[in-house]
Amino acid sequence: MRVSEQSRLAARLGYLQAVTERLEQIQQQLATGKRINRASDDPAGAVVALGHRREIAFEEQIRRNLSSGISFMNATESALAGAVDVLQRARELTVQAANSTLGSENRTAIAAEIDQLINQLAQIGNTTFAGAYIFSGHKTRNPAFQVNGNPPTSVTFQGDSGERLRQVSRQDSVAVNVDGGYVFGTVFDDLITLRDRLRGSGTPEQFQESLAALDAALERMIDARAALGARVNRFEAALRYSEDVDTDLQRLRAEAEDIDLAETIVQFSTQEMAFQAVLGVLGRTTNLTLLHFLQ
Amino acid sequence: MALAIGLETAVKALRAHQLAVDIAAHNIANANTPGYSRQRVLLRPLGYDAPDTWGGGLLGRPGLGVDASDVHRVRDVFLDYQQRNAISQREQAKAQASVLERAELIFNDPSDEGLSVLLANFWNAWHDVVSDPESSAARTTLVHVTATLAGRIRRAYTNLVDQQTNLNLRVEALAGEVNAAVEEIARLNEQIKQVQLLGQPANDLRDRRDLLLDQLAGIGNISYTEEPDGTVTLTFGNVQLVSGITARTVETYSVGGMLHIRTTDDNTAVTVTGGELRGVLDARDTDFPALIGKLETFASTLITQVNAIHATGYGLDGLTGRDFFTGTGAADIDIHPDLVADPDRIGAASAPDAPGDGTVARDLANLRFASVLGGRTFEEYYANMVAILGADVNRAKGLAKSNELLTTHLETLRQSVQGVNIDEEVANLAAAQYAYQAAARVITTIDQMLDTLINRTAI
């Protein structure tokens, strides 16, 4: 075929452009580390990548929900542990009081300590976590327990049985709080009655009655702690599972949109060699003209 | 008498080869001129074409030398025709690809900065409100994240509409280019006609006209015929714009804010099936409206769905029935200013006076997985929109590339016919030079013969 000056020039430019374009594309991939920088680079792959990104973002939030839920439950658990300590002390004192040999002076001293324990327990019941009263149900801006009178004559529960939710998976939302009204139950009234009996002339039968009431309260607290511990374990398991899911998703996302570094570097050096070859060939053929051979 | 004819023959040869040198020079000078067709001197032997008036027959008589009056250009009109069709298709695909590519940049996905990330942040921020409904930090974050998302949707919408209406400027410019080209073609028609009447070939004028036809083919599909008088009759799309030495111009007119092209004299709407104009119009009138429509559906559904649930929620102030978003679509979506002023008003609770209740916020967070957009979730709908746009860009780019290959191939073929090759011209130059020297030698020889006859022959 006849080759004209213009088509020679166009062809040379064409070779150079083709090689530089491929080189540029690989350079961009190397710089961003991504095979898909825009949807048009691979529309089907982009849908897959966006799907994985969506799942990754969701799982990340689920882990956030789980961790903050665990923190909340840990705070609740420490509070319950404190309450159990208080009740156990109250129980010890009640056992002492039930001992009929105790003098009225000692009984008054025990009554004073029970007053303190009531206040201490109310304080524990009013534990806050990130500004929210954890035993108040939905009424988290109100202290759960209001102690009336000094020494206390009654304690009112100001919360409700509302559930504090955490979304832990696509389908499930789980409550992380415990029902303060249920867990504390009549414990304040029981303690106030006990104190009144200590101040007055409580009979051994009455102290046995108080002891039974305290045991019931302790059982509720311990049960609540156990249930909470089980929930924390579930959350921790879910957290580990979500981390595994995340690892898988990250790998899938990378497979969909990231480059294979080794392969791309090999491609780059191949294209670089091609570029040098084109330049070399152009340099040698450009001077090929009849003018050099005619004097 | 015969010797004088010999001289005349030699002079004709000198002229012919001088012309050949001139043409080689012209070709070399235009070796890199776009659209130039190489020219060739048509050499024709001159014989006796009249009965012999000097007695004797025609037989055995030498001819009268060479005739070199005709210079023609080497060109394949069929290749021109093919190439112009290919150029129309290429420019259509290129225009569409470049316009859609810019639209794709607006969404910038998949990436860490795209709209999809902002959407995920929005749903995630609701989760944080579920977890800590009374926390003003979680609520404030939700307000910011929402404002960012709404802002990005509005910006995407504005950018799309801007790009769409900016295509009007391109239509306007293309109309101007069409007018300039057809007017010049009509002028060239006139010149070519005149030059042809003088018996000249008008090669360079034709080259210029062919180049303009190439250009016009890039704007829209064209058809043309060359008349016996050398003029071309040109049809652009559906309207004849050049006939003989007259050109009809086109103008733009607006339909609903979108510019179209019609003839100036009788307002016939110009429709093209190829070329940049078709690509621009397709993008402006089909691709962009579809894209803008999807973004609108996305935004308006987001507004109505979120508002419907949010209206059932109670703020920390105990009030309910509030909108979360203001606006009706992608153009004006925004977070309600009351919520910006006081994030405590966000309705996360299902009852008044329940600051720790995040039930409604939970329902909103779960809207993420609701198939409310024709069987798709918000995120799926958006991903699908981006992917379809990506596929459109990909297809247009692929089409542009394959058409580019076709035009490159045809151009190579065209150049192989009409293009100048310097080596060839140098060889022609050498041949003409030798022939010129030989013709000069003929004159010397006849001169010597005449010298012998006139000066050396004793009387």
Image (tube, rainbow, N blue to C red):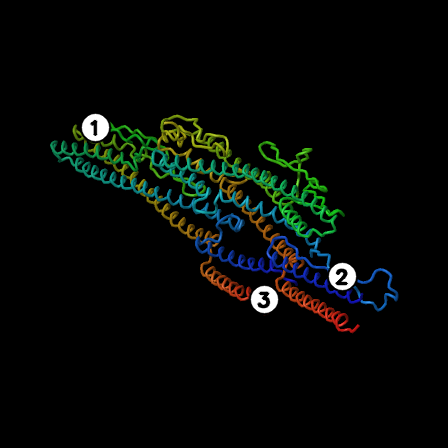
Q: Which chain carries label 2?
A: B
Q: Which mark is residue A291?
A: 3
How far from the left and from the top, in percent, is residue B258? Answer: 59, 34
* Residue toward you, B376 or B415: B415
Q: Which residue occupies the extreme front position in the image?
A: B459
**Picture residue at 78% right of the left edge, 74% below the top:** B458
* Residue toward you, B53 or B185: B53
Q: Which amino acid does label 1 sit on?
A: Pro
Reading the chain from its start, which is encountered first: label 1 or label 3? 1
| Image quadrant where one finds the C terminus of chain A | bottom right
* Residue toward you, B248 or B39: B39
* Same subunit, tags 1 and 2: no
User: What's the CA distance linking mark 1 and mark 3?
Assistant: 117 Å
How far from the left and from the top, in percent, is residue A286? Answer: 55, 64
How far from the left and from the top, in percent, is residue A97? Answer: 17, 35
**Label 1 belongs to which residue?**
A152
| Image quadrant where one finds the N terminus of chain A | bottom right
How far from the left and from the top, in percent, is residue A135? Answer: 31, 34
Which type of secondary structure does the marked residue at label 1 adopt?
loop
Q: What residue type is labelled 2?
A: Arg
Inspect this view and state whether residue A60 appears: yes
The local crowd at label 1, few if under 14, some if 14 to 19, many if 20 or more residues have their Cα within 10 Å, is some
**Picture residue at 19% right of the left edge, 36% below the top:** A94
Which type of secondary structure does the marked residue at label 2 adopt?
strand
The answer to which image quadrant residue B335 occupies is top left
Q: Residue B443 carries which label?
A: none
* Same subunit, tags 1 and 3: yes
Q: Which amino acid does label 3 sit on?
A: Leu
**Label 2 belongs to which residue?**
B44
